[in-house]
Structures are given as C-alpha cells and as structure tokens.
Image (cartoon, helix red, strand yellow):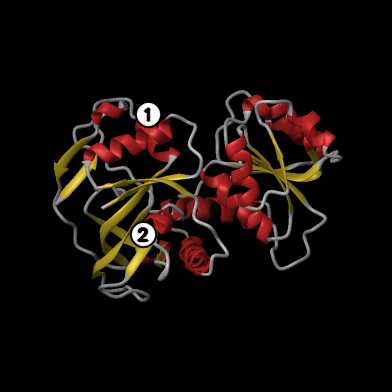
Amino acid sequence: MKAFGVTDNKIDSFVEFDKTKETATGRDLLVKIEGISINPVDIATRKNITDKLSEPKILGYDGYGVVEETGSEVENFKIGDKVFFAGDYTRDGSNQEYEIIDERIVAHAPKETSIEKSVAMPLVTLTASELLFEKLNINPAVDNRNKTILIINGAGGVGSIATQLAHLAGLRVIATASTPEKVDWVKDLGADLVVNHHQDLINQVHDLGIENVDYIVGLSDNDPHWKEIVELIKPFGTFATITNLRESQIADLKSKSVNFAWEWMFTKAKFKLDSMSDQGAYLEKLADGLDSSMIHSTVTKVFHGFNLENIKKATELVEGGHMMGKVVVKA
C-alpha cells in the first residue's frame, strides 16, 4: 500500500513509499483513509528528529475513513462503518492508505457532515475538551455566567473549537485575534470579547472592565505572554497549556495559588489508560454536534488528492504559523 513519511527534520524529506498493509487484531480497526488534517504536532514531531531515519516516519494525527477489518475483541464497530479519530502518537499516523487504530479512540463519523469538515475536528476537539472539562474542571451543566476565560490564540486550530465549547458551557469568553478577519472569525464562533495578542493583554483586558479572569488557556508560545498571564489570572484560578515553557517559571503563580495543568491529547493512548475510551465518547458527541450545527467545523483550506505534493503543501501552510482554523487533505 501507499504511505507518506519523513526521513529527517526537513520538509523536503517527505517521501512516498510502499508499506505492507497491517492486520487488525485485538481491539484494533483497520481503516481505509479518505481524509486527513495537518496539525502543529506533525511539524513539531518532524522537527524533533535528530538523525537520519532508516525508515520513513508516518505522521498524521487526524483521520477519516471506512473500517475494512476489525480485531477479534472489537465491540463498537463493524466492517463498512465510516469513522474518524485523532490517532495514537506511538503508532504510525494517518498519512497512509490504511491505518491501524484502537477502537476506544475512534468514533462513528458524522452522517450529515462532509469528510473535509469532519476530519478537521478530532485532534483539536479532543485537546479543547480535555483542557476545558478535565484540566480546568469546567462543568457545562451548571451556570457558568460568572466565570471568565481568556483563550490565547483563539483563531488557531484548538482555539477555534475551545472558543465554541467555552461559549456553549456558558462562560464569558475572551479570545485573542490579531487581524480583522480573525476577529470576525472568533466572534462568529462565540467569543464575547476579543483582544490582540500582539498588544498588551493586561491593558486591553482591564479596558474591558475586567480585572482578573478565572481561567487562561495558552495555545501558543507562553513566554511572550507570561507576565500578562501571571497578572491577569485570579487567585485560585487555573492556567492550562498545550505548549512548552522555555523561560517562564511556574513558581510565579505560587503567590496566587494558581492551579497549573499540561494538556497533551496523546497521553491516554500512549499509556493505555482506561480513560482512553473517553476520547471515543468525546468524538461521538462531536459527530452529533457537527450534524446538528451546534458545533461548526473550523476547516478553512482543503487540498483535493491524497498525494505527496498536497501533504507537503498543507504542511507548509500550517508550518507558516498564520493559519486560521484547519487545513485538510481529502482523498
């Protein structure tokens, strides 16, 4: 079968190669891939390669396709089901014709929503859901109107769905965006207020009449915003992030007794935790939300044709760092 991988940390190392199609065993599904989406983790993984690889590494952490084979212990899917998922970092990704994936982190694909709109959403939705509902411990079933959240990089892939989910949970949402187009984008997704992350966040938030916020989510480089984060978070508030801290010191949050949490969407699958099935459940809810239009897909660019050229073009777009929403490659 056809697969696409990288052999070093340069984008030009992408190659197409032949790979033996695997067989589904245990709780695994064998899925024929019909669409993928590119995420920043694809770029970060490639750039972290230090030596020339003897075999290409297959990236890709959003997938959509049809179940072709099921393992003997599979309970929730059958051959022919259309599914979508975000994958497992410890296994080959979705940049291949057929992918092996554990059923617990898979969901039935939306019935009324296109492939491109669907496949843009799994990784970012899982990340945003775990950030809001597990790391920030936000309960969407209670009245959250007196709670305020600041989402830094609100127009990006994760920010675009985090803004929607926070709005649906009833919070007062402040999202950051840096251009008129992106300001309109986050407002349409449910942001109540918008500030520019290229300008002083403290002054902007204070000018909105808000002294401190209950929650802050860091979805871009935290270091340039660290003093702003420390100043704006409420005592006993919570800060959660998906990115590394290179210079910022967690101890700066101590005097406010601020809770701090990392979010890495792949942790549950990597360590084979019982909670990995929560990801399948989140995605089943996402499918319903997309079909009912409660959740809006954040795809903004689609490449037609599952080939090396389009995967490289899509990767270059994401790597440029200025994407609004998500980019998809459709077979």
Question: Considering depth in this image, is 163 or 128 the residue closer to the camera?
Answer: 163
- Could you say whether the residue bearing mark 2 is in a helix, strand or loop? helix
User: Could you tell me which residue is drawn at 34 percent across and 74 percent down?
Assistant: 77
Tell me the quarter of the picture where residue 101 sits. Answer: bottom left
Up-down relation of residue 73 to residue 188 (above or below):
below
**Mark 2 crowdedness (10 Å alpha carbons): few <14, some 14-19, many ≥20:** many
Question: How far across and how far down the image is residue 57, in percent?
Answer: 26, 39
Which residue in the structure is indicated by mark 2? Answer: 115
**Mark 1 crowdedness (10 Å alpha carbons): few <14, some 14-19, many ≥20:** few
Residue 44: tell me if it is visible: no
Question: How far across and how far down the image is residue 113, in percent?
Answer: 42, 64
- Could you say whether the residue bearing mark 1 is in a helix, strand or loop? helix
Q: Please give left or right for residue 61 compared with residue 292 in the image.
A: left
Up-down relation of residue 180 to residue 64 (above or below):
above
Which-is-in-front pick, marks 1 and 2? 2
Question: Considering depth in this image, is 195 or 253 the residue closer to the camera?
Answer: 195
As drawn, the label of residue 32 is none
